[in-house]
Image (cartoon, grey):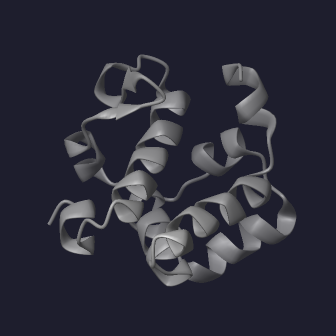
Amino acid sequence: MTAQRIYKMSFANIYPLYIAKAEKKGRTKSEVDEIIRWLTGYSQKALEDQLEKGTDFETFIAQAPGLNPARALIKGVVCGVRVEEIEEPTMQEIRYLDKLIDELAKGKSMEKILRK
């Protein structure tokens, strides 16, 4: 999948995949939402509004009210690429989210996922 293609995909189409991945491993939708809110600064209402609007991934990231500065602590590999080495900012933000959802599915505690 090229970077441009994922940017134009509706976040509302990806969101259920994050939830399914988490629930398959015994985690919850509310934990997925908490991760998204922590990373982006969206309130729950604003997140739901973005989902309703069908906002594309690029716009979802660009309009994030406050990207969490602690996201720089997210390290590791997603899709064979180290997230901390991704140079394109929007792609890095998307992969940060992917990495956090992976950590949730692997059973990490929310405290560790949210870098507390």
Q: Which residue is rendered at x = 75% and y = 73% of the image?
A: 49
User: Is residue 16 positioned above or below 100 on the image?
Assistant: below
Q: Is residue 109 left or right of residue 19?
A: left
**For this view, does 56 lie left or right of residue 104?**
right
How far from the left and from the top, in percent, is residue 84?
29, 27
- Residue 26 is drawn in which quadrant? bottom left
Evaluate whether residue 45 shows in this view: yes
Residue 94, given in percent of the width and then of the height, sits at: 53, 40
Q: Residue furthest left?
A: 116
The C terminus is located in which quarter? bottom left
In the displayed structure, 61 sits above or below 22; it is above
Left or right side of 79 for 4: right
Q: Quadrant of the N terminus?
A: top right
Residue 71 lies left or right of residue 90; in this view the side is: left
Residue 53 against residue 95 in the figure, above or below: below
Of 62 and 25, nearer the camera is 25
Residue at x 42%, y 23% (from the top left corner): 80
Q: How many marks?
A: 0
Residue extending farthest right: 53
Which residue occupies 40% across, 20% down? 86
At which x and y percent is residue 102?
41, 52
Relative to 46, residue 90 above or below: above
Residue 38: name its quadrant: bottom left
Q: Residue 62 at what x, y percent from top left? A: 60, 43
Q: Is residue 67 visible?
A: no
